[in-house]
C-alpha cells in the first residue's frame, strides 16, 4: 500500500545549509523526495532455510537474502536500512550495495540465533560449491594388482565423463577414499590410486565419484548462477576480514594514545564490534573457504586461507598434518 505525505521544510538551519551546498542539477533530482514521500507497507512472509539452493537465480537469492537480513537489523543503521528495503525488491544493484551493511549489522548487533542463521546460509553456499560431486560408477573390486592399483569389475556407469571436463576422480571403498591417478585403460579395468588402502579390499563394493571445479560448469546457466552467488559470499567474508584487521589496528593505536586515561566510549564500542566480528569469522572453517576458493579457481584466496588454517593449528598446538587437513 502507498500513502502520500508532504514534507516542505527542513528541521533546522543546518539542513538548509547542507542543501545549499548540493549542486543545482543534483537538487533537481532529489527535490521530489523532499516535497513528496512514499511510505511502503508490506506483509513479512516467513522465509524457508536455507535460502540458497542450486536452482535459485542469483538476483532472486540476493534480493531475498538482503530483505531477510534487513528485517532482523537493529539500531539506527537498522532503521535506515528498513527505509530503503522496498527498493531491494526491484533492483539487484541496490541489494548488493546494502548486503554488506546488513551483514555487519547482524554480526555486531544481532542476537545469536540471527548470527547462526547468517553463518549457516554462507556455509551452505560454500559447501555446495566445494562439493559438486556425482557418482560415476559402482561395482565390485576383484583383486589388488599392486599396493596402488586395483582391478574393478561389474561397473554400472551412471554419469559419463568427457575428456574435456575438469574433474577430480575419487575411489570410495567402505569409509576410505582415495584419489585416482589414472583412468581405466581398456578392458583391463585397472585403476591406480594415490595411496594404498590400509586393508585388503578384494570382493568389496566400490564407488567412483567425480568432483567438478566451478570452471567446468561455468558455461551452463546454473553454473554461472552458483559461481556468482559464491563470489558474493567470498566478497562478504573478505569485507568482514578486512574490517576486522583494520579494527584491531585502530584499537592498538587508541590503546597507545589513551594509555592510563579513562575508557573512551568510542573505543569500547569498537572493541565490542571487533570481538563480535572476530567470533563470527572464527566459526567459518578456513579449510572450507580454502577448498571452495580452489574449486572456483581463486588460487590466491585458497592459499591465503590454507596458510591461515595451518597457522591456527600450530597456534593451538594441533599438528598441521592431521588427517582432516589433508
Image (spheres, rainbow, N blue to C red):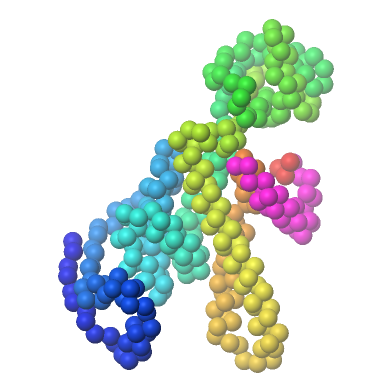
Give the residue furthest to the right.
146
Q: Is residue 49 above or below residue 189?
A: below
The residue drawn where x is 79% and y is 45% is: 321
In the image, taking residue 143 as reference, residue 24 lies left or right, namely left
Q: In which image quadrant can residue 192 be found? A: top right
Q: Residue at x 22, y 76 (%)?
A: 35
Residue 192 visible in the snapshot: yes
- Number of residue marks: 0
Q: Residue at x 26, y 72 (%)?
A: 33
**As rendered, which of 239 and 158 lies closer to the eye?**
239
Location of residue 15 with respect to 157 vertically, above or below: below
Point 46% across, 55% down: residue: 117
- Image quadrant where residue 248 sits: bottom right
Q: Which residues are magenta?
A: 296-323
Image location (x, y in percent) of residue 37? 23, 71
Q: Kindly report the secondary structure that dominates the magenta region of the rendered protein.
A: helix
228 and 267: which is toward the camera = 228
Q: Quadrant of the N terminus?
A: bottom left
Left or right: 214 as drawn, with respect to 143: left
When the figure is inspected, residue 30 is found, relative to residue 264, above or below; the finding is above
Give the quarter of the figure containing the C terminus. top right
* Residue 125 visible somewhere in the drawing: no
- In the rendering, at what x and y percent does residue 39 appear? 23, 68
Is 303 included in the stretch rendered in magenta?
yes
Residue 142 rendering spot, x and y as whole percentages: 71, 11
Nearest to the observer: residue 299 or residue 252 = 299
Residue 151 is covered by the magenta coloring: no
Expressed as whole percent of the image width and height from the top left, the position of residue 307 reads: 74, 53
Amino acid at each position: 500500500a502507498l500513502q502520500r505525505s508532504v514534507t516542505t521544510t527542513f528541521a533546522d538551519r543546518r539542513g538548509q545549509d547542507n542543501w545549499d551546498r548540493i549542486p543545482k542539477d543534483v537538487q533537481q533530482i532529489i527535490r521530489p523526495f523532499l516535497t513528496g514521500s512514499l511510505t511502503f507497507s508490506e506483509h513479512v512472509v516467513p522465509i524457508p532455510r536455507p535460502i540458497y539452493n542450486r536452482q535459485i537465480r542469483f538476483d532472486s537469492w540476493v534480493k531475498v537474502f538482503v530483505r531477510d537480513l534487513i528485517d532482523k537489523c537493529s539500531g539506527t543503521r537498522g532503521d535506515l536500512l528498513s527505509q530503503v528495503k522496498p527498493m531491494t525488491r526491484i533492483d539487484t544493484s541496490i541489494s548488493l550495495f546494502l548486503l554488506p551493511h546488513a551483514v555487519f549489522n547482524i554480526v555486531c548487533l544481532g542476537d545469536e540465533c540471527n548470527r547462526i542463521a547468517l553463518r549457516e546460509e554462507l556455509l551452505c553456499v560454500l559447501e555446495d560449491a566445494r562439493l559438486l560431486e556425482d557418482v560415476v560408477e559402482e561395482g565390485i573390486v576383484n583383486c589388488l594388482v599392486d599396493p596402488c592399483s586395483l582391478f574393478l569389475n561389474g561397473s554400472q556407469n551412471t554419469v559419463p565423463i568427457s575428456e574435456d571436463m575438469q574433474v577430480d576422480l575419487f575411489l570410495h571403498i567402505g569409509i576410505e577414499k582415495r584419489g585416482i591417478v589414472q583412468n581405466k585403460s581398456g578392458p583391463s579395468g585397472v585403476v591406480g590410486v594415490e595411496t594404498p588402502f590400509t586393508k585388503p579390499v578384494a570382493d568389496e563394493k566400490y564407488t567412483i565419484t567425480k568432483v567438478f571445479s566451478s570452471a567446468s560448469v561455468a558455461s551452463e546457466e546454473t553454473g554461472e548462477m552458483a559461481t556468482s552467488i559464491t563470489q558474493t559470499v567470498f566478497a562478504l567474508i573478505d569485507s568482514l576480514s578486512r574490517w576486522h584487521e583494520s579494527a584491531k589496528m585502530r584499537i592498538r593505536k587508541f590503546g597507545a594514545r589513551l594509555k592510563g586515561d579513562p575508557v573512551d566510549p568510542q573505543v569500547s564500542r569498537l572493541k565490542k564490534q571487533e570481538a563480535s566480528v572476530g567470533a563470527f569469522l572464527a566459526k567459518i572453517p578456513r579449510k572450507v573457504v580454502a577448498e571452495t576458493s580452489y574449486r572456483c579457481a581463486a588460487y590466491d584466496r585458497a592459499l591465503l586461507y590454507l596458510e591461515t588454517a595451518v597457522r591456527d593449528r600450530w597456534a593451538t598446538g594441533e599438528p598441521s598434518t592431521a588427517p582432516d587437513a589433508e
